Image: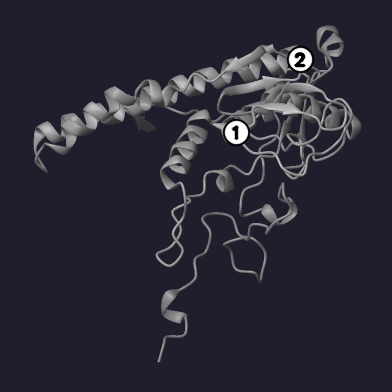
Amino acid sequence: MSRRGRRWYASVLVKAPAIASPLPNRTQRIAGTVGVDLGIARLATLSTGIETSYPNPRHLAGAGRRLARAQRALSRTQKGSKRRAKARARVAELHHLVAERRAGTLHQITKHLAVKFETVAIEDLNVSGMTRSARGTIDQPGRNVRQKSGLNRAIMDAGFGEFRRQLAYKTIWYGSRLAVVDRFYPSSKTCSTCGAVKPKLSLTERTYRCDQCGAVIDRDQNAAINIATAAVAAPDAVPAVPVAGDRPETLNARRAHERPTLTGGQRALKREDPEGPIQSGPPRRSNPAALPQPV
């Protein structure tokens, strides 16, 4: 049981035998591969064209005035009062509605991509790095802190991580495939026509102009085409790890010594004692009294 806003949600876990993934149907094979470039101006730009792309609804910005009004009303209440509890519930309800609308939009887009195309190619975005604060330190303060804070808020509102998570299991459900292109691939700087790579490309340049062949194309569509091309050129590169689908459950931290991480980083460790066989029941904790005490 969990509570979000004013609503309670009950989760039921059912263990079912694994079912073989369906094969791509005729419509998916004809559509082939699509490259998806995630962004702020447009939530998802497809390699098939700007007219088929998805705009960014900006759910948090749309509810900004109501949230600001509710938070100001909360700040004026007295701690421990009934009015404060009601005001806090109002703020939580507004945040819950924003989260539900965001999830609904992402579900619609990811299902459409998984059903229509045989292969969906996206970038391995480092969302935590993209949303890192630019405040800096006292000795070395950051620059354009307010602008970077607004960009971070817009990236988190778009839900790039949730977009990829939903695609990971929906492509298994509907017989398609998710291809994840390396995060260091210069998809925005590479010309989709001749393959030339620009040494520098600022974020303010929304139109890509190639210095070699003279091609002029929208920046995001150019990146989406390059992502699709990279997925076709290396179809087995960086396969996506399915999570929460109709397959067997992924291993948790207590069995994670057999499962490599997606990026090859540090593997999860078990909480049980390293010596002896694994016992059933709750994990055995270390005894704090037996640990060496500081002198």
Residue 191 position, x and y percent, is 82, 30
Q: Residues within 10 Å of mark 1 (few under 14, many from 20)?
A: few
Residue 40 occupies quadrant: top right
Residue at the far bottom: name it. Answer: 295
Q: Secondary structure at mark 2?
A: loop
The extreme top residue here reads 27
Mark 2, other Cα within 10 Å: few <14 / some 14–19 / many ≥20: some
Which residue is at 43% across, 67% downward? 139
Q: Position of residue 292 (x, y in %)?
A: 47, 85
Q: Amino acid at mark 1?
A: Thr
Q: Which mark is residue 204?
A: 1
Q: Toward which corner of the image does residue 137 lie, by quadrant?
A: bottom left
Q: Where 78 falls versus 22 (above or below)?
A: below
Q: Is residue 210 visible to the viewer in this orientation of the structure? A: yes
Q: Nearest the camera: 271 or 213?
A: 213
The image quadrant where one finds the N terminus is top left
Left or right, 72 with reference to 202: left
- Tell me which label, 1 or 2, sits earlier in the chain: 2
Q: Amino acid at mark 2?
A: Thr
Residue in the picture at 82% in, 23% down = 215
Nearer to us: label 1 or label 2: 1
Question: Disc 2 marks which residue?
Answer: 48
Report the residue at 65% width, 40% height from top. Answer: 125
